[in-house]
Image (cartoon, helix red, strand yellow):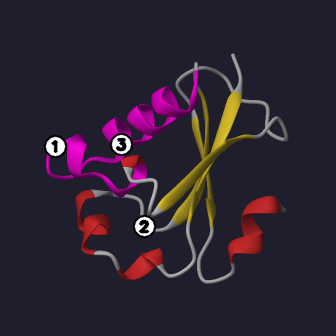
Amino acid sequence: MPVYRLTPLEGSETSPQWQASSMRPYCLWVRAKDELDARRQVAKATAVTGDAEVAPWKDEGLVACEYDDSKELADGIIYVRRAMPQRERCHA
């Protein structure tokens, strides 16, 4: 199964939607079937309100999600790297 990287978009860290997530604007990698599955997994794993539907990870206007084979992950593992304020940290 492929690995996807979810990267908060520059300027998104001020969105109130981050209150619905236990993870602040960090880069996350997750093994998933596709982009939608990656977003769902991260939203569910980080939901603090019990409602993963409002999670910023599902919002394409706040978080980019793309295939990234630079990390080898086991199923069910979310790898975290702080992303803000410098977006390029996600690519290191």
> Which residue is found at the position 14% from the left and 43% from the top?
50
Q: Residues within 10 Å of mark 3 (few under 14, many from 20)?
A: many
* Residue 41 is a magenta residue: yes
Q: Amino acid at mark 2?
A: Arg
Q: Earlier in the sequence, mark 1 or mark 3?
A: 3
Instruction: In the rendered structure, find residue 60 and report the number of the disc placed on it.
Output: none
User: Percent position (x, y) of residue 11?
Assistant: 50, 82
Q: Which residue is mark 1?
A: 51
**Disc 3 marks which residue?**
43
Left or right, 67 with respect to 49, comes to right
The percent coordinates of residue 21 (x first, y second) are 31, 57
Q: Earlier in the sequence, mark 2 or mark 3?
A: 2
Front label number (2 vs 1): 1
The residue under label 3 is which amino acid type? Ala
Secondary structure beneath label 2: loop
Q: Are marks 2 and 1 in contact (CB under 8 Å)?
A: no
Above or below: residue 5 compared with residue 12: above
Image quadrant in which the N terminus is located:
top right
